[in-house]
Amino acid sequence: MANLFTQQQPQTSGAGPEPGSGYQAVDTKIPPKARPVFSEISVNGVAIAESAILAEAQNHPADNPGAALKAAAEALVIRELLLQKAAEEQVTGTPETTADGRNETAEDAKIRALIEMVVDAPSADEVECRRFYENNRDRFRSNRSSRRATSCLPPIRPTRPPGGRRARRLSR
């Protein structure tokens, strides 16, 4: 026997969510936010933005995108370490203009000044260079057999005289 006093649930066509299910349709007008490519990277509490790593990756040719991203992240970590060391040592640098007319950034100037302060690059005058050359002549010579010019092309064997049949045909 059917119970005539119970409230019946409305019938759905299956085309949408069940009423009262709490389901909310996805707004297709706004694209979903992309998941991060990798986990957050930070150096002593200073986060390196994913967008900075993605932008830096173009400067690191690699066999695959993952290797380029890894190289870019490593470069930015090293850069941040140098900037933190420059701040710790209170190094200031004045931005310079390069030979090709590009202006150095303030951060690049600090890193350059830090390296100039810490690294003692040896210099040599002409006499020292000449002495090194004279003592190491073998290192500046190439093997005699490698000096011969060789061609990777096969030798030319003319099979017809210049112009051949086609030239005769066209001249008629």
Image (cartoon, rainbow, N blue to C red):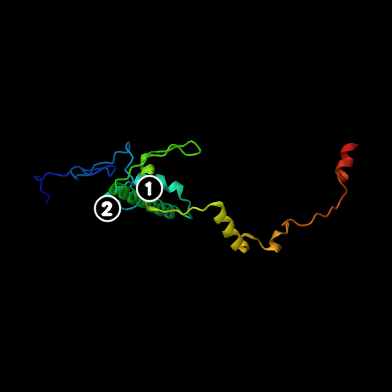
Three-letter amino acid code at the position of disc 1: Ile
Say if residue 37 shows up in the picture.
Answer: no
Between 166 and 8, the one nearer to me in the picture: 166
Residue picked out by circle 2: 44
Three-letter amino acid code at the position of disc 2: Asn
Using a 10 Å C-alpha cutoff, classify the residue at mark 2 as few (fewer than 14 neighbours), some (14 to 19) or many (20 or more).
few
* Residue 16 - label: none
Q: Where residue 126 sits: x, y (%)?
A: 56, 52
Between 168 and 140, the one nearer to me in the picture: 140
* Residue 53 - label: 1
Say if residue 124 shows up in the picture.
Answer: yes
Residue at the far front: name it.
127
130 is higher (above) or lower (below) than 24: below
Is 62 displayed left or right of 42 in the figure? right
Residue at point 65%, 61% (across, down): 142
- Label 2 sits on a secondary structure element that is loop
Between 55 and 142, the one nearer to me in the picture: 142
Residue at the far right: name it.
172
Is 25 displayed left or right of 93 in the figure? left
Marked residue nearer the N-terminal end (1 or 2): 2
Using a 10 Å C-alpha cutoff, classify the residue at mark 1 as few (fewer than 14 neighbours), some (14 to 19) or many (20 or more).
many
Residue at point 25%, 51% (across, down): 45
